[in-house]
Image (tube, rainbow, N blue to C red):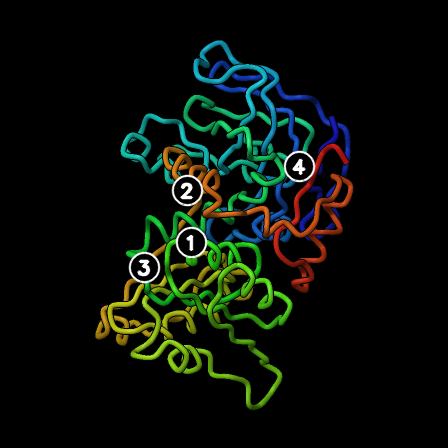
Amino acid sequence: MRAAVLKAYGEPLSIEDVPEPTPEPHGVVVETEACGICRSDWHAWQGHGEWADDQVPIGQILGHEPAGTVIATGEQVRGIEQGDRIAVPFNLGRGHCEFCQNGHGNVCENGISLGFEANAPGAFAEQVHVPYADYNAVHLPKNVSSVEMAGLGCRFVTAYHALAHRADLTPGDWVAVHGCGGVGLSAVHVADALGANVVAVDMDDGKLDTARELGADETIQVEPARADAADVPTAIRNLVGGDGAHVSVDALGIAETCRNSIDCLRKRGQHVQLGLTTDEERGEVSLPTDAMTMREITFLGSRGMPQTRYGELLRMLDRDVLSPGKLVTKTVSLEDVPDRLDAMNDFGTSGIEVVEFSR
């Protein structure tokens, strides 16, 4: 089968023939119909994460946002059959540890990350293996296409988990979203669907236009090259009134957006970190901890979404409360993946791009 393989950090992925997977007793093999292209794939391609013992190994098949049809099942699998249409969370649990048993399989003690670890080859491939499928595989509703589900990917489910489960978000609250790439736009759309008021912040006016279409009530365009560029936290306070935002999301992962996110919060506000850092920050950002203590600011991390909570998100899709397909701006072929990752070097993509294997 064809797959996109990491040969060297920062060098174009190699599209080549590799052996087809066979199912482990607890796993299934999926014929990949669509797979999102995510900034986390870009981080992996660049070789980031060494500082957190999270660097993707050379030789890895990338891709972690697949949807497709089951073509083979292991002998221990009971809830998945050949022909089932499924989606696959990137944060794969085993279903047995205390976190999995308590509904937090996204942080399974022995979990693996699809497309990021040698024992979990990814879905930039015509077929992908899903371990512990009875726990991890998510059945797709008939009215949700594989492209739309791939658009949900890790970005949309991460944004949903962050705002619906991690943050204490109340309808009418103000949510600031710093960075309007895939996960940022997802956060805008989710926050709006949950009844919040949203301020979207980005450098790109086109991305802010999309944010407004997805529910942003206010937008701030950052122009760092200008001497009179907006002070983002002050601009947010001026827009929302009062002491600042109730919840703020760093959807980019650079020091500036993380600090702006915390500084724009009102007392007892909640910062949610979604963006991963680059080799400039190397996983470390300086924060105003004394001010955070005095103002009782909460710092929350959020990673993917528990497998056991996909149902509530899919029900929102079924009722058209959420429409992740609106974020899909382009479908491409597997051969296009190296170029699309390269475009992310200068933030040259908008919305969510998806590999469609029928192309």
Q: Tell which circle, 1 or 4, labels the residue nearer the N-terminal end.
A: 4
Foreground tag (4 vs 3):
3
Measured as percent of width and height from the top left, residue 22 is found at 61, 17
Q: Which of marks 2 and 3 is in front?
A: 3
Mark 4 or mark 2: name the one nearer the start of the chain: 4
The residue under label 1 is 193
Instruction: Give whichever of 254, 246 is nearer the camera.
Output: 246
Q: How far apart are marks 4 and 3 (CA)?
A: 38 Å
Q: Give the x, y percent position of residue 313.
A: 42, 41
Q: Mark 4 points at which residue?
A: 124
Above or below, comparing residue 86 to residue 170 in the picture:
above
Tell me what residue is drawn at x 74 percent, y 39 percent: 334
24 up-or-down from 9: above or below: above
| Residue under numbered circle 3 | 171
Q: What residue type is labelled 4?
A: Phe
- Say above or below: 57 vs 130: below
User: Which is nearer the N-term, disc 3 or disc 1?
Assistant: 3
Query: 207 above or below 220?
Result: above
Q: Where is residue 169 in the image (x, y as percent from the top left)?
A: 31, 57
3D distance between C-alphas at marks 4 and 2: 21 Å
Q: What element carries label 1?
A: helix
Nearer to us: label 2 or label 1: 1
| Amino acid at pointer 1 | Ala
The kind of residue tagged 2 is Met
C-alpha separation, residue under disc 1 versus residue under disc 4: 31 Å
Which residue is tagged 2?
305
Separation (CA) of disc 2 from disc 3: 21 Å
The percent position of residue 332, horizontal first and vertical second, equals 74, 44
Residue at 58% in and 80% down: 224
